[in-house]
Amino acid sequence: AQKITQTQPGMFVQEKEAVTLDCTYDTSDPSYGLFWYKQPSSGEMIFLIYQGSYDQQNATEGRYSLNFQKARKSANLVISASQLGDSAMYFCAYYNFNKFYFGSGTKLNVKP
Amino acid sequence: DAGVTQSPTHLIKTRGQQVTLRCSPKSGHDTVSWYQQALGQGPQFIFQYYEEEERQRGNFPDRFSGHQFPNYSSELNVNALLLGDSALYLCASSLVIAGGLYNEQFFGPGTRLTVL
């Protein structure tokens, strides 16, 4: 099975600063998708951003961007201009063959 | 447009009992996946239903079973509950494009199951 690793159990960032959440994956599949989800304390998973393995450019969605380095098998999430509402758990997920594999998550705390 | 809905919100059971969780997918979605999320961990894939059949399954015992109805709604059944089954159970719906790598899942709010 594919393995997704998020090495930062918790992160702190000052409001309005940028923060990078790390994600690495282990796969021998030539094609796959990479996703980031946000999970507030309410529990619902919220889709943030997607990167396909064949995409040439890094994905961006508003304040979210994905730093995709295929050779290094990393897909780090960058949040620019952090807001207090960004405080939540963040999960990286690998998708292929109709299955998602999630990492263990990073808890982000944004300080005022 | 209603998103993914799940019921019940919370549930308390005792060991050995059976439980049924329900999920209604987002309008237009035909695929439902179920996940188990233990406290402090990422979601673990249980199985996926498409066209009323189980299409993919994660590493879960046969005590975990499911069903998808013609209207695409789904149920997750867990028999002979164990203490370790206590978790948040998430349902996600999607519309899979054949051969595609993009599969945006929309998650429901989850059902919090506590086994005593």
Image (cartoon, grey):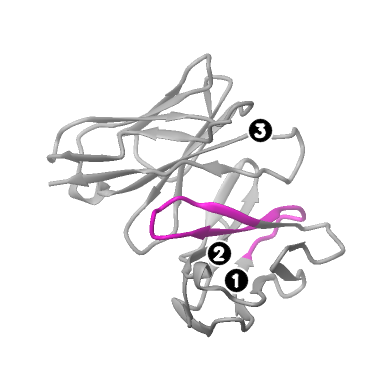
Extent of the magenta region: A26-48
Number of the front mark, 3 or 2: 3
Separation of disc 3 and disc 1 at Cα? Answer: 26 Å
As for residue B93 lying within the magenta part, the answer is no
Check disc 3 and give the amino acid type. Leu
How far across and how far down the image is residue B79, in percent? 24, 32
| Residue ID for mark 1 | A23
**Type of amino acid under label 1:** Cys
The secondary element bearing badge 1 is classed as: loop
Element assignment for label 2: strand
> Residue under circle 3?
B95
Is disc 2 on the same chain as disc 1? yes
Task: Measure the C-alpha gap from mark 3 to mark 2.
Answer: 24 Å
Q: What residue does disc 2 label?
A: A4
Q: Relative to residue A7, is residue B25 depicted above or below? A: above
B7 up-or-down from A3: above or below:
above
Task: Give the alpha-carbon distance from disc 1 to disc 2, as whole Å.
Answer: 7 Å
Residue B94 location, quadrant? top right
Q: Nearer the viewer, residue B105 or B97?
A: B105
- Residue B114 shown left or right of residue A82 in the figure: left
In the rendered view of the protein, which quadrant contains the N terminus of chain B? top right
Q: Chain of mark 2?
A: A
Asked whether A34 falls inside the magenta stretch, the response is yes
Measured as percent of width and height from the top left, residue B107 is found at 51, 43
Residue ID at (55%, 64%): A4
Question: Can you give x and y, in whole percent of width and height, for residue B101 in the image?
Answer: 73, 46
Tally of marks: 3
Residue extending farthest front:
A112
Q: Nearer the viewer, residue A58 or B18?
A: A58
Q: Amino acid at mark 2?
A: Ile
Mark in front: 1 vs 2: 1
